Image: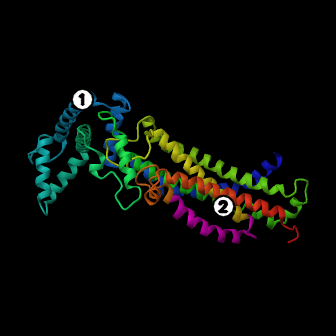
Amino acid sequence: MALFLWEMKKIWRPVLLLAILFIGVVYYPIRPGFYLDMTDHDVIGSAELQLSIGWLKQYGSTIDRLERAELEDQLIGLKEDFARQITNVSGASEAGITGYDSYLAWEDAFYEKEDPPEEERALHQSLLDNTNVYTIGMLISFMDNYDRLAAGGSAIDTGASIDPPSPAAKASIRRITQAEENKGVYGFLPSSMVNDIDAFFHYFAIWCSFSAILLLAPALVNDRLHHTRPMQWASRRGRKVLNTQIGSALVSGLLLMVLNCAAYLGPFLSTGTLQFWRCPMVSVWPGSFPWFDWTYGQYLLALLGLTALLTLATAGFITILSWYSANYVSVLLKAIPLIFVLEWGAIPWIMDGAGRFSGKPVRLIGQPGAEFIGGILTAALALFLCSLVYRLQRKKNLFI
């Protein structure tokens, strides 16, 4: 244990951690933070989210037919709110807009004009900015989708299934048919929120992998630069020291991911999305269909587990490269191709749309859960290579 703690101390150097922290602060608002902000700042997505939050508090995680009937009263109330809000919009009454129905008639005429006057453009934008028109539109859309499904319609009719020639086409149709067997009770998890959270985890996984490379790249190079390997191998522990070094590097990669989770937890919780934890992923809101009967909470745990697998794989790969590097320049040159393969190739390909129809691996091979299989195989490959390196080094001549 003392040797393990010593190897951990060699990895976790304060200067290196400060550099990782600085890069992380710069990276966050560019990618993962941007998509977290979108869960509440996109006007259509925000309307979806606020409606769903209200239903969650009132009805629970699903809406049945009796509860669907109550949405008519909610629509009436929103239209009354709209009628009050337009009294504060300059030019609305002059344009003949006195309620939501007259607004729709005015908007249809507005869009029919090839080049509307600047005054009408300004009025249209003011109506969008200062009324609940988006909320009304999203509620009407939800009610129409609910009624279509309750009447025997299917998400297949709206193009939710995967199109041929993808080998996953038939599996997607079977999945939708199986998920829609319980007619009349439907979830309302906002699809725009799920898309933004998916993108957040996509870039979060990239950061966890990249930060692991930054932390572990110099780890085993130091021993070669300071000529400590022969002394380590000649010690009482002998070449088993390498086993401890590899283990400490893998544990450090996962520990760094935990710290990244802690750092990102505050902004993530601020979105309020965790209140949908028990909501089913299958939703009336149109979006990428889920492959499994997961709740939103199970979906988040699956993405987190996939991120952990990819981080572990990264830690294993960079540890091997660090072992075979003679100096810092050498490990940097080796790390660049690894960064390109992982951060621009494997990780985006595996994480994007994971667990849903939009996932690329399943569209390619036709097996639901292919992205999770890919994550497991990638981590297994890294661990196998680490084990192989350890065995080869145990047989190596000390003086070669």
- Residue 47 position, x and y percent, is 31, 43
Can residue 231 be seen here? yes
Q: Amino acid at mark 2?
A: Phe
Q: Secondary structure at mark 1?
A: helix
Is residue 139 within the magenta segment? no
Q: Which mark is residue 34?
A: none
Q: Nearer the viewer, residue 247 or 123?
A: 247
- Residue 162 position, x and y percent, is 36, 55
Disc 1: which residue = 70
- Residue 179 position, x and y percent, is 37, 41
Q: Which residues are magenta?
A: 323-348
Which class describes the residues within 10 Å of circle 1: few (<14), some (14-19), or many (20+)? Answer: few
Classified by dominant secondary structure, the portion drawn in magenta counts as helix
Q: Nearer the viewer, residue 205 or 115?
A: 205
The N terminus: image quadrant: top right
Q: Is residue 170 above or below residue 182?
A: below
Specify which label sits upstream in the sequence, 2 or 1: 1
Q: Nearer the viewer, residue 186 or 172?
A: 172
Q: Secondary structure at mark 2?
A: helix
Disc 2: which residue = 317
Q: Which residue is at a point 10% across and 48% down the rendered structure image?
A: 105
Q: Amino acid at mark 1?
A: Glu
Q: Is residue 78 above or below residue 316?
A: above
Q: Nearer the viewer, residue 336 or 99?
A: 336
Instruction: Left or right? Give the position of 174 relative to 348.
Output: left
- Residue 197 position, x and y percent, is 44, 48
Alpha-carbon span between mark 2 and mark 1: 56 Å
Q: Which residue is at a point 56% across and 51% down the rendered structure image?
A: 307
Is residue 340 within the magenta segment? yes
Please give the count of numbered marks on the rendered protein: 2
